[in-house]
Image (spheres, rainbow, N blue to C red):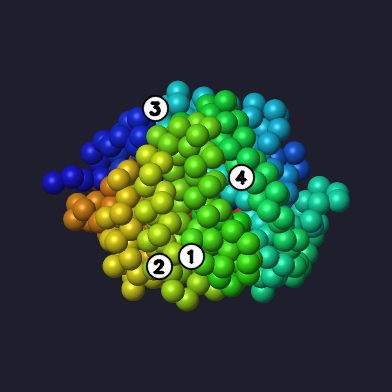
Amino acid sequence: MTTAFDPIDLGGVPLANRIAMAPMTRSRVGHDGVPDELTVEYYAQRATAGLIISEGVQPSAVGQGYPGTPGLHTAAQVAGWRRVTDAVHRRGGRIFAQIMHAGRIGHPDVLPEGLVNVGASPVAARGQVFTGRALQDFVVPRELTGAEVRTTIADFAAAARRAVDAGFDGVELHGANGYLIHQFLAPGSNRRTDEWGGSVEGRIRFAVETARAVAAEIGGDRTGIRISPGNPFNDIDEPEPEPAYTALVKELDQFGLAYLHVGEVSSQLRDLTHTLRGLFSGAFLLNPATAPRHTGPQELALIEDGTADVITFGALFLANPDLPARLRQGGPYNVPDAATFYGGGAQGYTDYPTL
Ligand SMILES: Cc1cc2nc3c(=O)[nH]c(=O)nc-3n(C[C@H](O)[C@H](O)[C@H](O)COP(=O)(O)O)c2cc1C
């Protein structure tokens, strides 16, 4: 029987175990989006993960959704990430960069002077975002022109190249949780009538073409993608996820991707999880539906019963830098402190104790 403590190959990347750290935005870098010494320490502390998936990283200035998130669009950011990846590799770990374009989620006040948020269609998300000083309503995004859609895809590919230059083992495209790729997938936020919208084929095109461009740039075996079918987060309206996501995964499978990462939002969607896994040839990473609690030791059984190849842990990994060792011996576990999830310094970031 395969267990969480058995190794696995992801594309060509050998992982020591099947316990991965889920991508988590921590909003702790400066305005330049450059990872610093504290970022290095945070990720290095978690290097016993089979795989670390980084926090969401913007591929371009306009792709930033929140204050204090890092980028992969300047030379200084590449140099900052190089120190992170070197530290993780020195400790025997593996790390992919999550490339996250926030699209309509965010606010012009978070962006450099003169930039406005962009999206598939001029439809604002209901809700608010913390812009550094205050909570503000999401704005109506400027609709990307057809030519700009192509440029945005090229920005993903360029960021993927910079990720590899920075020493990442690969990249994960953030197609989940209501950010730009998901905004194209969902009918509520994509009202386009051109080739990038309308039918299922149109709505999945941005995700497919982004994966194609990134795989062409750095290799399919270094490219993963995260999706969260039916996730209403960030005002996504996606009443019938199955047709779009099965079509999407069938298309993605042609690129020989390293992995598919499903963020499962409801246990009622477990059948769809199984279906998507069956349609995909690469490794299958699962962040299982467990709400209201966090993913925990119970979910390791999903590897043993073959539901997933790798389980990704969010909050529990945030609070337990040595999570694989704790899972192996059955705990105990530090409790995640939600008050320090976003922003601030070392507290709630690098000060969770190891065993
Ligand atoms: C502080 C925090 C930040 C997060 N940021 C991201 C992110 O940048 N990208 C992403 O895909 N998911 C993000 N997530 C979602 C997690 O990856 C994960 O799906 C979620 O926490 C549920 O898993 P869990 O129960 O293991 O924590 C974040 C979650 C938390 C707690």
Who is closer to the viewer here, 116 or 148?
A: 148
- Asked whether residue 89 is in view, the answer is yes
User: In the shown orientation, is residue 197 left or right of residue 144?
Assistant: left
CA gap, disc 2 to disc 4?
24 Å
Q: Are marks 1 and 3 in contact (CB under 8 Å)?
A: no
Position above or below: 300 against 32? below
- Asked whether residue 27 is in view, the answer is no
Q: Looking at the picture, which amino acid does disc 4 mark?
A: Ile
According to the picture, the residue beneath numbered tag 2 turns out to be: 243
- Identified at 47% across, 76% down, the residue is 239
Mark sitting earlier along the chain (1/2)? 1
Residue 200 - label: 1
Q: Residues within 10 Å of mark 2 (few under 14, many from 20)?
A: few
Mark sitting earlier along the chain (2/4)? 4
Residue 94, percent from left and from top: 42, 33
Who is closer to the viewer here, 355 or 104?
A: 104
Residue 92 - label: 3
Residue 73, percent from left and from top: 68, 36
Q: Are marks 1 and 2 in contact (CB under 8 Å)?
A: yes
CA gap, disc 3 to disc 4?
32 Å
Residue 329, percent from left and from top: 25, 46
Position above or below: 338 against 71? below
Mark sitting earlier along the chain (4/1)? 4
According to the picture, the residue beneath numbered tag 4 turns out to be: 153
- Identified at 65% across, 46% down, the residue is 150
**Element type at mark 4:** helix
Q: Residues within 10 Å of mark 1 (few under 14, many from 20)?
A: some
Q: So how many labels did they put on this image?
A: 4
